[in-house]
Image (tube, rainbow, N blue to C red):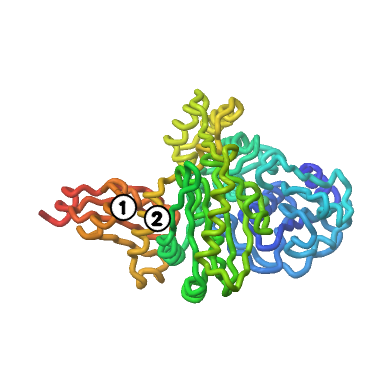
Amino acid sequence: MIDEIINKAKKENKSVYIFAHKYPDGDAVTSSTALAEYFKIHGIDAKYVVSSQVRLFQNIVGEISTTSDVPSGNISLIVDTSTLSYAENDLFKSSATEDTYVIDHHQKDEHTPCIEDELNLPKENVIRDLGASSTCEILVSEFNRENVNPEIANRLTLGLLSDTAKLKFIKPHTLDNLAKLIEMGADYEKISSISNRKSRLKDDVALAKVLLRTKKVQIGDSFGLVLSISNDSAQNLLSRYGIRNPQKKIFKMEDIEGCCLACTVAENERNSYTFELRNSSTYGNLNVFALALHYKGGGHYGASGFTLTNDTLSLEDATSEVIHTAQDMYSKDSGFTDLPQESEANKTLAKIFSRTQRLSHNITPDILKEVSGLIENGADYKYYMHSFKTYTEFMLQNELLSKIPDFKLNDKFPSIRIKLSERDVSFLTKKYNASDEQILGCITAFSKINIKNASIYLPDGRGTTIDKNGNIRRVTAEALERKNGR
Ligand SMILES: [Mn+2]
């Protein structure tokens, strides 16, 4: 289709205007600007049209100026956008239907018509590929390899990584297409570090203080993690830290080893309790959708929610009532652990993932192709891509983050030093049965937070540090002594 657009633009001397969706994300800005660049290489005037300022990934896609009007009679190409109402603007209406094209990977819902239906476009002007992870992935096969420069390859890589949450959710050909991008000159290491959208220290510390109140409850032979957030606490999170609907931060409680249910509940309005529920298909397989339906809520098998409004029920009572229901529902058919089997394919995949830190470092096209082959041979990609932590690790991280003083929280790139006293260590050891190693291991919590650097020190001078690129270093007691000039 891209070749056809190029031929038409050249023959009829037309420009190409590119459009994407509202609140443009990584895939939208990279696919649009990669297309504009690709058309320009072919001598065609092309532009990504946005009505309001876009600042995302400026270091890779360049500055994007806004446009308020486009001349009629040109070609419009709409990408990454499934419905008309989701488009950032409708200046593509200046093109004839036969000159309007769509490239997208979003699901076509049987009840809502897609943008190509709403605009009555000819079938041959549309690529809607549900088997692709991202618009960028579709473009890998649409572009001619010899015309893709490293800059375009970088943009497509960035879009692919951001729509797959760094390869967590891939489609059958995603890894093979990524291999092609690296062969075309993409700097994977650089793009991978850019695509890391880190959270603000302030938000993570605020949440850690709340998460410290997480309770562990027995559910069958597994356990659940429960966090209730009172109205006072919810108001405080909103007014002091701008955190709205704290129950939605439940992802912080996901992927804990052995845990079958994560449950958060917030009293955002008095006597109205909003629950969020997640299960783990690896541990316990508790059907949280059925649990939500029981309380007239909804969602999916693994992620659901509902609201209980009751003037006579306290937050504590509402929470324990729901947990009792979960305990009753945890039956023989749900309570099983589904760890991957010890096959050759799984063993090899686990090795590759540990060597490459889950495909984030030292990647070559051959490694990606190998992983792709292992998936075909039944390797459990999804399981190994998850990083499970133990309950102790989870709670220790909350404890250490909570120790960061308020005045550090407003720095843009803070430098954090957590020095633990003898008393701190004995408290953590007693409460969580934590080892020194586990305490120092908490440094990984900072790999997803915007910081300049961070370090954790035990009273004897041993420590761990992490820099803004996620490189972790051990500090031995001797090294510290040398540094202090002894
Ligand atoms: Mn997309």
Q: Which quadrant is home to the C terminus?
A: bottom left
Q: Is residue 279 above or below residue 276?
A: above
Q: Is residue 240 above or below residue 261?
A: below
Query: Which of these two is toward me, 295 or 464?
Result: 295
Q: Which image quadrant: the N terminus?
A: top right
Q: Secondary structure at mark 2?
A: helix
The amino acid type, in three-letter code, at marker 1 is Thr
Whole-percent x and y of residue 104? 74, 48
Q: Earlier in the sequence, mark 2 or mark 1?
A: 2
* Helix, strand or loop status at disc 1: strand
The residue located at (15%, 57%) in the rendering is: 484
x and y, in percent, of residue 375 in the image: 58, 30
User: Which residue matches tag 1?
Assistant: 465
Q: What separation in Å lies between label 2 and label 1 (alpha carbons)?
A: 10 Å
Count of numbered labels shown in the rendering: 2
In front of the other: 435 or 367? 435
- Up-down relation of residue 242 to residue 145 (above or below): below
Which numbered circle lies on residue 65?
A: none
Residue farthest to the left? 486
Q: Is residue 168 visible?
A: no
- Residue 214 placement (x, y as % from top left): 44, 58
Do residues under tags 2 and 1 come within 8 Å of each other at their CB atoms?
A: no
User: Which residue bears the numbered disc 2?
Assistant: 446
Q: Is residue 29 visible?
A: yes
Q: Is residue 430 left or right of residue 58?
A: left
